[in-house]
Amino acid sequence: MSYTKTKDVLGTVNRGDVAESGLCTLCRADCTGKCETYLTGMLGREMLYPRDFGMVTAGSSQQVGPELSYQGLRINGYLYGSSGLREGLTHSADDCIFPNVSIETEFGVQQKTKSRVPFMTGALGSTFIAAKYWESFAIGAALSGFPIVIGENVVGIDKEAVIDNGKIIKAPELERRIDTYLRYYDGYGAILVQMNVEDTRNGVAEFLIEKYGNKVIIELKWGQGAKCIGGEIQVNDIEYAVFLKKRGYIVDPDPESIQAKEAFESGALKAFSRHSRLGYTDLATAEEVRDAFMKSVAHLREIGFQRITLKTGSYGMEALAMAIKFASEAKLDLLTIDGSGGGTGMSPWNMMEHWGVPSLLLHAKAYEYASLLKRQGVKVVDLAFAGGIAREDQIFKALALGAPFVKSVCMGRAMMIPGFLGANIEGVIHPERREKVSGNWSQLPPSVTGIGMKAEEIFAGYYDIQEKIGIDAMKEIPYGAIAITTLVDKLGCGLQQLMAGARKFSVSEISRDDLFSVTRDVEKETGISFVTHAQDEHAKQILYW
């Protein structure tokens, strides 16, 4: 399937091929614009509306296609009623306004994790781009009040980390990432740390509980939507490649082989790829996986973790059922289900293009399986849906498709783009900071100068942050974090508007009845009524009053 590269009504242009999320399939940190997410990092809520108000009218270019994606769902609006109003508000037209819609959410069992918005970031792990822009990502998330996930392998690839017989003595990069978030954490959001096979061997969980206690949430990882193989990075330093091999990773090609050394020295070989291991390879049945998983969870609880989550990828139906069933049995706090169509820091491209279950189909089945468990009297684990979600309409659709089980939506690249943008702007306005913030530009492009020349002019959310933390503290806030909070404000406002139109004034009130299917195939796969079938019987009853 293909999506339009330009949206004249918003004045946006995608540099490359366009994914369902509306993002380019290849998103560059040095991009000079100007896709919708890029511009939103500066203009915020303004990007909710057609450009050049007062000079234009605008019409939708939407065409109903056969693809089994979130494009196949539309959002229902209602003529009357209202539900979910917070205490103190009435059902009057003066109170039922979109700014009064609460988009706060929470997940968890005994200790609830609160979030100001019903979305979070995906795992930002050992890819170098996550490390370079971490301050923008983490501070933006903390100031906005949503959870952020530190991905796998952060300790394992850190040259400065000291690991002795599976016990971490020192982990400066992991500590930097956690401490950066906690510095601005105000009770909303959370910092999650992911574990894979190597992290388990390296004693990441034991290190975290000893140093941070329950300030962090531990996340077990079964997979992600972008690939069906372990985490990967690419390195162009042969000495570093040897270091990673000695740390216990799979490095391809073998940097210690004579052929690889010669090829690297000649320039024919320019990089090595580091891979993580697959989990559960020694198990042959679902029952064995359950036993191993429960032992892992029991160990984490024994050493002191109160909040444990799981992330699974776009495997087939058996693995999906196992994830929901086992996570519910283990009383985990959240299960993130990542469908194919999501992004990545590094994955084999054709694997990413051709493996796994597309997000809409995976999420529809997740709802079905969760409902089956609920009918059995099981307390179903709280869910988060992920996989190619970037805009407020997609957030609403995911929350509604999985209601009432889905408490949050997990996004990756959409939250990174404003981080890149802000860093690039900061590096031009303050050249002395360019290297520190990983700025890629030598001058501001027209997509920025057309908005302003100073941070106060460029970022619509600048003064909101200043009001929250004070003028002096603003000096410490990276522009990438300001851009992220500006994007979050637009997404939140857009979500409030969609919810108000559906007459739902809190996230917990969103339901599957708030969606239509626009193709028969989507209706069949999701159980969401076709657009002209929804409420049709009641409509005909009205005609016979």
Image (cartoon, rainbow, N blue to C red):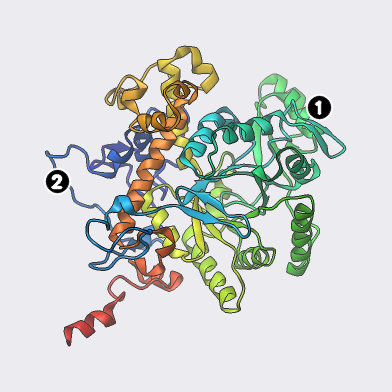
Q: Is residue 149 left or right of residue 462?
A: right
| Residue 353 at least partly seen | yes
Instruction: Rate crowding at label 2 as few (under 14), some (14 to 19) or many (20 or more) other CA atoms within 10 Å.
Output: few
Tell me if residue 540 comes above or below residue 410 in the rendering: below
**Which of the pair 192/132 is nearer the observer?**
192
Amino acid carrying label 2: it is Thr
Check disc 1 and give the amino acid type. Answer: Ile
Name above or below for residue 422 compared with residue 150.
above
Above or below — where is 252 with respect to 240?
Answer: below
Disc 2 is placed on an element classified as: loop
**Disc 2 and disc 1: Cα gap in Å?**
67 Å
Q: Nearer the viewer, mark 2 or mark 1?
A: 2
Image x and y of residue 397, in percent: 40, 59
Residue at image x 36%, y 20%? Answer: 444
* Quadrant of res 425: top left
Query: Disc 1 designates what residue?
Result: 258
Q: Which residue has dot 2 on it?
A: 57
> In the depicted view, which residue is nearer to us: 409 or 382?
382
For residue 226, side relative to residue 479 (left or right): right
